[in-house]
Amino acid sequence: MPYYRYKARNRDKYIVSDIMEALDKGDCVRKLKKNDMVPLDVVEIKIASFLKGKDITITSGVKKQDLVFFLSQFYNLLNSGLGIIDSLKIIIDQAENKYLKKYLIKVLQDIRNGSSLYGALSRQRKVFPKLLIEMIRVGEVIGNLKKIVYDLHAYYQKQTKTSSEIKSALMYPVFLLIATISVTTFLLIAVVPQFQDTFSQMDKELPFVTRFVLNVSHFIQTQFIFVLLFISLFAILAILFNRSKEGKMFYSKLALKIPIFGQISRKGNLIKIARTYGTLLDNSVNAIEGLEITRNVISNQIYIEILDKSLLNIQNGVPLSKAFEKQWSVDPVFSSMMAIGEETATLDEMLNSIADYYDNEMDMSVEKLKKMMEPLMIMILATIVGTIVLSIMLPMFGMMDGGLS
């Protein structure tokens, strides 16, 4: 059966563009009208097997900040007494991100056609995370959607804050690293060769630092393409290796063991585990399902294995905290506080307290990293550039001394 890409105006006056399977163009138009949509354009897709269910964009185009905006607006509107449909219409009109607006229009259309909010969101998994979708399902089941949306807003707001702190800590060192590489490459390719002929005419032996810089400059000029090819090949092999089970485990360990950055990565993962699982338990999600959802949120294989062990522990009647004890990737305070939460039947509250505790630890770690990396990167940049300048100046001084004598 062929597929058709259509553009139509729905009952809420929004323009909807999507793909539909139909017998022919007329059948597609009839289906659209049946869903109270006015067809504007219907075109058959010849490569439907490739495009089926796929968007043109590589990613959803919706960032975490956009989810925070959506959840904040959704909670405020629900709290003011509006229904889901009216709330979504207002958010769609206010949304500045065109991709978020597009997906919300699809969600609204599905709800208009009789779907639940959970069902409508689950059809847009490209943009809405599994945690959000499952929490919405819980909210609809227990009849307390407003509280769930508020908790989700708080959760993603804190997650966004943590991610922003890590990015801000890395941004300055990365900028200086790029600047260092760019300046060094420019000097070695464009500046140093200008003095090469002059130095070759000197009778005296060049200083070691000058000979070293000249050799590096010559190598880059003659082998630059091969260097780029080697770096590109190395990057491709690293990406392919990351897709294997062994590669994922290797990079997961590496991320946690790199000096300074490893501590930040460790805290970030523990915050995500505690915040996610605590939020789920606090909203009536059972322990096993909560662990499964939390596992899907985590990307580091080390912690995924710990969560798998935790899942087996719960199923066999063993305390959850036992899986976190004596793990090199888990701080003792984390497993101890989790054990106290289990013993006092306040695990959800304890997990949220743990997340807050590590949030503060993260703030201090990020500030420490910034204070440490800024002078370090400046020192590296100054050392490299200074070495190149010195390699040029030393022979020049030698020529001047020879001339004066």
Image (tube, grey):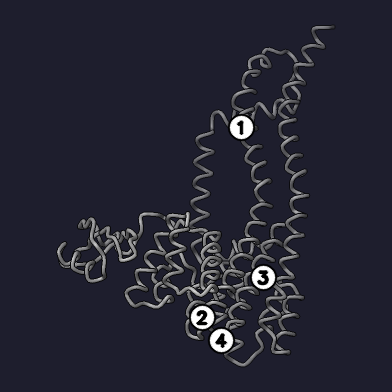
Residue plotted at (57% across, 90% down): 315
What's the distance in space between the residues labelled 4 and 1, CA to CA? 57 Å
What's the amino acid at mark 1?
Answer: Thr
Residue plotted at (71% across, 66% down): 359
Secondary element at tag 2: helix
On the picture, is 129 further left or further right than 345? left
Whether 335 is drawn above or below 69: the answer is below
Quarter that holds the C terminus: top right
State the image quarter where residue 307 is shown. Answer: bottom right
- First of labels 4, 2 by sequence position: 2
On residue 149, the disc is: none
Q: Position of residue 304 (x, y in %)?
A: 58, 73
Residue 1 visible at all: no
Marks 4 and 2 close (CB-CB < 8 Å): no
What's the amino acid at mark 4?
Answer: Asn
Marks 3 and 2 close (CB-CB < 8 Å): no
On residue 185, the disc is: 1
Count neighbours of disc 3 (C-alpha within 10 A) and say few if under 14, some if 14 to 19, many if 20 or more.
Answer: many
Count neighbours of disc 4 (C-alpha within 10 A) and say few if under 14, some if 14 to 19, many if 20 or more.
Answer: few
Q: Which residue is mark 4?
A: 286
Whether 217 is drawn above or below 370: the answer is above
On the picture, is 18 further left or further right than 206? left
Residue plotted at (32% across, 64% down): 53
Residue 20 visible at all: yes
What's the amino acid at mark 2?
Answer: Gly
Q: Which residue is mark 2?
A: 139
Residue plotted at (59% across, 61% down): 251
Residue closest to the far front: 81
Front of the two marks 3 and 2: 2
State the image quarter where residue 41 is shown. Answer: bottom left
Front of the two marks 2 and 1: 2
What's the amino acid at mark 3?
Answer: Leu
